[in-house]
């Protein structure tokens, strides 16, 4: 599993293979592919934050080659339904038509405004940008504390069969 330690906190973000598969389906590999995105939900087990569900894109999202504006209607219902399954809303994901994506100015503004919505003890909002390259090079993971965002370096890709 891909692991992203959050600084020196001891918390580590893991991505389940199903979530990485979901991201892979929406990579913008052709010029006509539009940005996609949605919400991220995780099981929290001690210091392991295991991202288990990635939702979206939805039929009413506004999508272009270099923009993605999700339809926020129903987002809170999705958060409540996942919470009933002990899955915590931890942040959002979206794609970029870049090999190794970097957050745009608008992404920084979105992250700042979304931090208050993340209801978990991480004290930050997780923002994943899916680029064209396979992970880890094409996956950018940012934790935003409401003031600034920090890109998390991956801790390495586990061999198949390694424990999470
Ligand atoms: Zn973006």
Image: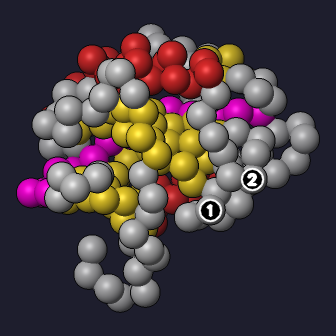
The main secondary structure of the magenta stretch is: strand
Q: In which quarter of the image is residue 21?
A: bottom right
Queried whether the magenta region covers residue 19, the answer comes back as no
Q: Quadrant of residue 80?
A: top left
Query: What residue is pinned by disc 1?
Result: 137
Residue at the image position 35 percent from the left and 88 percent from the top: 161
Q: What element carries label 2?
A: loop
Q: Is residue 157 visible?
A: yes
Using residue 30 as the reference point, say whether residue 128 is left or right of it: left
Question: Foreground: 50 or 139?
Answer: 139
Residue at the image position 44 percent from the left and 23 percent from the top: 111
Question: Foreground: 111 or 68?
Answer: 111
- Percent across and percent down for residue 107 are 56, 25
In this rendering, is residue 21 above or below 80? below
Queried whether the magenta region covers residue 42, the answer comes back as yes
Q: Which image quarter is the C terminus in?
A: bottom left
Residue at the image position 13 percent from the left and 37 percent from the top: 121
Residue at the image position 62 percent from the left and 21 percent from the top: 105
Using residue 62 as the reference point, say whether residue 161 is left or right of it: left
- Give the number of the disc on residue 99: 2
**What span is in magenta?**
34-47
The answer to whether marks 2 and 1 mark residues whose Cβ atoms lie closer than 8 Å is yes
Asked whether mark 2 and ligand 1 are closer than 8 Å, the reply comes as no
Q: Is mark 1 on a helix, strand or loop?
A: loop
Residue count near mark 2 (Cα–Cα under 10 Å), binned few <14, some 14–19, many ≥20 = some
């Amino acid at each position: 599993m891909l692991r992203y330690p959050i600084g020196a906190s001891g918390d580590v973000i893991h991505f389940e293979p199903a979530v990485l598969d979901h991201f892979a389906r929406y990579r913008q590999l052709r010029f006509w592919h539009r940005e996609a995105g949605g919400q991220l939900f995780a099981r929290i087990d001690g210091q392991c934050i295991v991202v288990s569900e990635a939702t979206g894109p939805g039929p009413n999202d506004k999508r272009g080659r270099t923009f993605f504006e999700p339809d926020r209607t129903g987002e809170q219902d999705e958060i409540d339904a996942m919470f009933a399954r002990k899955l915590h809303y931890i942040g959002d994901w979206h794609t970029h038509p870049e090999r190794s994506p970097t957050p745009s100015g608008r992404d920084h503004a979105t992250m700042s405004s979304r931090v208050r919505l993340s209801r978990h003890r991480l004290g930050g909002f997780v923002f994943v940008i899916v680029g064209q390259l396979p992970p880890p090079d094409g996956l950018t993971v940012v934790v935003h504390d409401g003031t600034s965002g920090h890109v998390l370096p991956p801790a390495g890709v586990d061999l198949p069969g390694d424990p999470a």
